[in-house]
Image: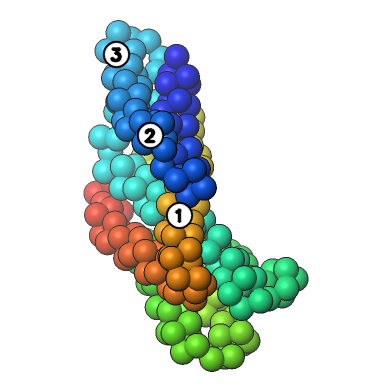
Amino acid sequence: MGVVLVSAGLFLLVSPLVESRIAGWPWWLVFCLILSLPVLTTFAWYEYWLTIRGHAPLVVLSLFGRRAFTVGILMVLALYGSSAGFFLVLAYYLQEGLQFSVLSAGLTFLPMGIGFFLASATAAKLVPKLGRGVLTLGTSGMILGYVLLLVLIQQNTPVVESVPLMVVLFIEGLGQGLVTTPLITTVLARIDSRDVGTASGVFTTTTQIANALGVAIIGLIFADEVGRNGAYAHGFIISLVVILGLGMLLFLFVFLLPSKRKQ
């Protein structure tokens, strides 16, 4: 029953956001979006009902009583939602706005992947020395990458099509790599062994929800802006501002995490 309720709630939440742009927000999509709230609330109540009766719930709600876990899940939503939306709108902007070929657009993403790989490999070694400072450093790198990209786009010159863009994306990849690996440890820190499976499931499910919502919401913003004036650069800038806002929110969440000795 828990699986049925949470699946139905997430379907009712995400589907209208994905379909609304083409369908034009008919009444039934609005109804589905509104209905998602009571369905997800019913899921939470059902999980609580199982818990107080000594049964095994799908999600152990007491996990959210741990600050590191709760803040970590919020960070997962901000990180994966912003990243998924960023990948989508950047691909559209490169291919439709700047007329990159599919191959050129793919190669433009390559420095970001390299930066992510290098930072991920280094993050595990930095955590024992810097603690949550690694997350601060990583989120700062992400914010810097988004700001530099905004500057490049607004210059509206051929420079955005070459080396500077790849350098900015490399910085962005470094930032994301420094956040992603330690974040997994943060979310699962101090979880009792009997609850590790549930906590891992919540983490994995949250990443998928964040990806879906990021693509749906940021993609919707991008499509609306482009549809309004036909300018891909403008649509990308507006979307990037929203993504930058999520990056700043992610940065603030780091300071809500308990310090290592308080976890």
Name the foreground residue: 138 vs 233. 233
Q: Residue at x 45, y 71 (%)?
A: 229
Name the foreground residue: 106 vs 12. 12
Q: Mark 3 points at which residue?
A: 49
Q: Which residue is drawn at 39% across and 69% down?
A: 238
Under mark 2, the amino acid is Trp
Q: Nearer the viewer, mark 3 or mark 2?
A: 2
Mark 3 element type: helix
Q: Residue at x 37, y 10 (%)?
A: 55
Q: Mark 1 points at which residue?
A: 220
Give the image location of residue 34, x and y in percent. 32, 32
Give the image location of residue 69, x and y in percent. 34, 42
Give the image location of residue 176, x and y in percent. 49, 64
Give the image location of residue 262, x and y in percent. 24, 49
Q: Mark 2 points at which residue?
A: 27
Relative to 40, say whether 210 is above or below.
below
Under mark 3, the amino acid is Trp
Mark 1 vs 3, N-terminal side: 3
Mark 2 element type: helix
Query: Can residue 236 be seen in this snapshot?
Result: no
